[in-house]
Every structure is written in C-alpha cells, then in structure tokens.
Image (cartoon, rainbow, N blue to C red):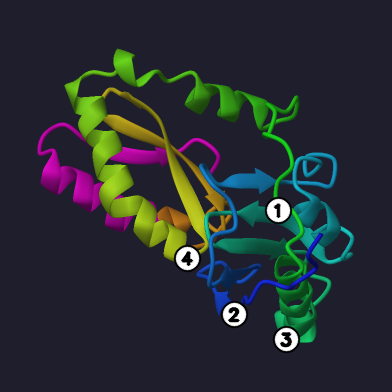
C-alpha cells in the first residue's frame, strides 16, 4: 500500500467571531453537508475532529467542504497556537488520514431539538414562499456565511418570520445578530416584499 503523501496546503483565516479560526485547505475535505461537533463524544464519526479535541483549548470543531473552523476557549490567544493547529491539520490531511469515517447521528443533547427541527423539514411539504426562502439562503447567504467559517440552515417560516440555525463561526458570534438583521433580512425583504418581517436564529 502506497504511503505517498498528498500535496496539500492549509492556511488560517480569521472570522468575524474572535473565538473561531478557519483553517482552509486547497482540496476537498468532505462530501455533502457540513458537520459540527461540540465535544469529543460527538466527534466519534470524525477522527480529525476527535484528535483536535485533544488540544485543551479546542471548544468546538466545524468541518465543511474545504475548511475546518475551530472554536477555542478563552484560556489562550490564537497567536499562541495557530501555527501548531495549522501544522497538525496540514500533516493529517497530507498523510491521507480519514476526515469522516461514519455518518453523524442525531445526538441526545440540547442540540437534538434544533437538529430535529431542521431535519424534519421535507422539501415536498414546503409552500412556494418557503421554497423561495430556501433558494435565497442556498444561493446568496450560504456562500457568504461559509467564507466566514460558518453555515446556515433553514429551520422554518411562520407569521412572516424566517427561522434559521447557525453553525460554525456564526454560532455564538457577536456579529451574528447584526448580520441576520442587516444582511439576511434586507435581502429577504428585497426579494420577497411583504412576505418577511423578521429573521430569527433558533440557536442564537
């Protein structure tokens, strides 16, 4: 079996959330949806996330298509550990080690309700307005949020209020509320006039 290392580059990128740093790869890391882990127990499906949790300052790990966003505890500053983390991820990916080894299961934690809300939404059951809201989120909002090391998921629409779930750098970010109010709400009201009065984060 070949042990040839795969050429890979990882660079660190700051996010609007000072507690979160984004480590971007020049290649795809995972297929499909982004995944978020809040502790080492949740991270079992991801060997990479599991090993990152062995760093004492790592609080949460968010893995997306071509980047890993890490949330740290306040016990340390990024400039003290950024090179260590970047080097670890670079070597891990370069060695061809698995990022994910199993699908992420629904967790019996405080996140369960949020997960159920978003996973129980069947596109076939959505009305015309809901379908358009999801299209706007996917086409205009998700790419911008991903650049900041986060993700956004549609969670519902009721009484002209759009509900979303924030993940990664967006979750708990001081600027998230401002982003929702100013950016996403204005976009929704421009593209769906009279149909959207507010945007709420169900976990914000």
Query: Which residue is tagged 4?
Result: 148
> Does residue 88 appear in the picture of this structure?
yes
Query: Which residue is tagged 3?
Result: 79
Q: CA distance from mark 2 to mark 3?
A: 14 Å
Query: Image point 55% across, 47% down: which residue?
Result: 34
Badge 4 or badge 3: first in the primary sequence: 3
Q: Secondary structure at mark 1?
A: loop
Q: CA distance from mark 4 to mark 3?
A: 19 Å
Which of the two marks, 1 or 2, is nearer to us in this view?
1
Is residue 150 found inside the magenta-colored segment of the image? Answer: no
| Of the pair 177 and 128, the residue shown nearer to us | 128
Badge 1 or badge 2: first in the primary sequence: 2
The span picked out in magenta is 178-204
Which of the two marks, 3 or 1, is nearer to us in this view?
1
- State the mark number for residue 11: 2
Is residue 189 found inside the magenta-colored segment of the image? Answer: yes
Query: Which residue is tagged 1?
Result: 99
Q: Is residue 13 left or right of residue 76?
A: left
Q: Position of residue 54 (x, y in %)?
A: 89, 60
Q: Secondary structure at mark 3?
A: helix
Q: Is residue 30 left or right of residue 45?
A: left
């Amino acid at each position: 079996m070949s042990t040839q290392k795969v050429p890979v580059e990882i660079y660190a990128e700051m996010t609007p959330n000072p507690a979160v740093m984004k480590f971007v790869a020049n290649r795809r890391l995972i297929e499909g949806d982004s995944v978020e882990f809040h502790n080492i127990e949740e991270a079992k499906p991801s060997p990479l996330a599991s090993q990152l949790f062995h760093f004492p300052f790592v609080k949460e790990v968010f893995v997306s298509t071509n980047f890993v966003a890490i949330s740290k505890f306040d016990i340390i500053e990024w400039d003290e550990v950024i090179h260590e983390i970047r080097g670890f991820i670079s070597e891990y990916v370069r060695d061809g080690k698995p990022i994910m080894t199993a699908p992420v299961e629904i967790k019996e934690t405080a996140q369960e309700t949020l997960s159920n809300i978003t996973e129980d939404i069947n596109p076939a059951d959505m009305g015309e307005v809901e379908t358009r809201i999801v299209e706007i989120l996917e086409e205009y909002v998700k790419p911008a949020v991903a650049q900041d090391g986060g993700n956004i998921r549609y969670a519902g629409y009721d009484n002209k209020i759009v509900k979303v779930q924030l993940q990664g750098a967006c979750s708990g970010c001081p600027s998230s509320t401002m982003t929702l109010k100013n950016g996403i709400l204005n976009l929704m009201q421009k593209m769906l006039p009279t149909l959207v009065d507010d945007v709420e984060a169900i976990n914000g």
